[in-house]
Image (cartoon, rainbow, N blue to C red):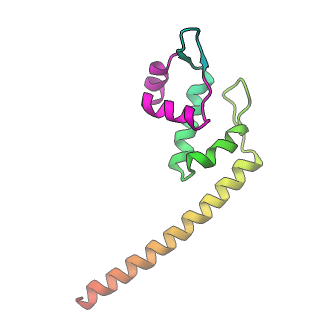
Amino acid sequence: MRIGELARKTGVSVRMLRYYERQGLLTPRRTAAGYRMYANGDTERVRRIVLLNRAGLSLATLRPVIACEVPGSADFHLCDALKEKLQVTAAELSEQIDRLRRARALLVRLIEAGM
């Protein structure tokens, strides 16, 4: 499928799909005319990239864990590399949440004190 169709199927802009390619997250084959051609499994890959990115993993972090995919299929497993990245990201998010809660509590105290 061509890039426009992949964009429609995934809800990801053509520009972002090109960016994913530059980041090494997608590797479409090229036609003789230079058009990008995506495999059916790329639809699921893009959806997975979006999901993991929304979960807090940067695109640079995703590059090595994309290897958890089963080549030639839409199958995906939680390989050790991805599991480790998810655990680290979850811990970082917990720390951020704690800092935000403390900041909010301080603001509420300042408001209540009439500052």
Provide the residue span drawn in magenta. Answer: 1-28
- The quadrant of the rendering that contains the N terminus is top right
Is 98 part of what is drawn in magenta? no
Residue farthest to the left, as pictured: 114
> Where residue 8 sits in the image (x, y, percent)?
43, 24
> Where residue 54 sits in the image (x, y, percent)?
50, 48
Residue farthest to the front, as pictured: 33
Residue farthest to the right, as pictured: 80
Q: Is residue 86 left or right of residue 103?
A: right
Q: Main secondary structure of the magenta part?
A: helix
> Where residue 10 sits in the image (x, y, percent)?
48, 29
| Residue at image location 71% in from the left, 51% down from the top | 83
- The quadrant of the rendering that contains the C terminus is bottom left
Q: Is residue 30 above or below residue 75?
A: above
Picture quadrant where residue 84 is located? bottom right
Q: Nearer the viewer, residue 4 or 97?
A: 4
Q: Is residue 85 above or below residue 92?
A: above
- Residue 12 shows in the view: no
| Residue at image location 38% in from the left, 76% down from the top | 104
| Residue at image location 33% in from the left, 86% down from the top | 109
> Where residue 3 sits in the image (x, y, percent)?
49, 21
Q: Is residue 41 left or right of residue 79?
A: left
- Residue 3 shows in the view: yes
Q: Is residue 1 above or below residue 71?
A: above
Picture quadrant where residue 78 is located? top right
Q: Is residue 62 left or right of residue 50?
A: right
Q: Is residue 63 left or right of residue 10?
A: right
Q: How many marks?
A: 0
Q: Nearer the viewer, residue 113 or 19?
A: 19
| Residue at image location 75% in from the left, 45% down from the top | 79
Picture quadrant where residue 65 is located? top right
